[in-house]
């Protein structure tokens, strides 16, 4: 019997997040990161702490799941408070469209009204729920399939994060781990979506 090797590097979840996106034009400036330019040093520091915290919590999860979950919830609470404290007024969170996405630490997939050719560079801004942490990053389209006729958003876009988005990638991984912990503990129902 032939055993296929798993190709994915990260877990994937379906989740509802706020998202805006558009094609990145040649030479266009787009500030990537976790928050506005003024708060980037603090957010980079928090991302580094979160990375270390996640490594320790993952080890603890196998030995003491209740303690790991409690620490994860406390960390999530601190992230929510930090996001609200550093929220900028340049783009209101309400201006993001809430949408079901399939998300991992290295990319995401979502429905779109617009077709993007493979290798198109996109600028993407997201708001993770419920923490309201805002991420700005660039990604490359790796797939664009058209679904059944009659859908409001007939295209299924798959993107891969660019390599220079380490802070955003770390935040996505933390968000996914926190969502998985919530789903495992039964405190949150898992969103479902039809993927074609």
Image (spheres, rainbow, N blue to C red):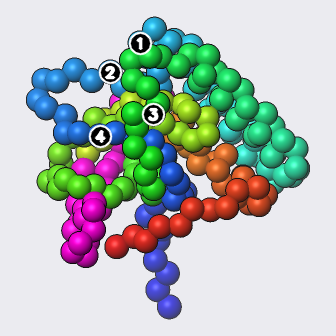
| Residue 187 in the figure: left or right of residue 117 | right
First in sequence: mark 1 vs mark 2:
2
Q: Which residue is mark 3?
A: 94
Residue 147: where, in percent of width, then height?
A: 26, 71
First in sequence: mark 3 vs mark 1:
1
- Nearest the eye: 73 or 132: 132
Mark identifier at residue 31 = 2
Helix, strand, or loop for circle 4?
Answer: strand
**What is the distance, in whole Å, between disc 1 and disc 2 at their CAs?**
8 Å
| Residue 10 in the figure: left or right of residue 59 | left
Residue at 45% x, 47% y: name it: 98
* Residue 153 colored in magenta in the image: yes
Please report contact status of discs 4 and 1: CB closer than 8 Å, yes or no.
no
Q: Is residue 156 above or below residue 162?
A: below
Residue at 76% x, 55% y: name it: 187
Q: Which residue is mark 4?
A: 21
Mark identifier at residue 142 = none
């Amino acid at each position: 019997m032939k055993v296929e090797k798993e190709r994915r590097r990260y877990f994937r979840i379906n989740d509802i997040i706020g998202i805006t996106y558009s094609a990145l034009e040649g030479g266009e400036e787009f500030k990537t990161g976790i928050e506005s330019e003024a708060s980037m040093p603090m957010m980079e520091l928090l991302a580094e702490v979160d990375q270390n915290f996640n490594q320790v919590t993952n080890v603890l999860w196998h030995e003491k799941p209740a303690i790991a979950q409690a620490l994860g919830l406390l960390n999530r609470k601190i992230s929510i408070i930090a996001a609200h404290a550093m929220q900028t007024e340049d783009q209101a969170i309400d201006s993001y469209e809430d949408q079901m996405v399939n998300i991992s630490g290295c990319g995401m997939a979502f429905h779109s009204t617009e077709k993007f050719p493979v290798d198109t560079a996109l600028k993407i801004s997201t708001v993770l729920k419920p923490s309201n942490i805002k991420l700005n990053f660039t990604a490359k389209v790796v797939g664009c399939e058209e679904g059944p006729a009659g859908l409001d958003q007939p295209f299924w876009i798959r993107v891969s994060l660019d390599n220079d988005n380490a802070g955003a990638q770390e935040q996505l991984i933390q968000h996914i781990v926190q969502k998985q912990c919530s789903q495992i503990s039964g405190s949150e129902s898992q969103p479902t979506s039809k993927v074609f």
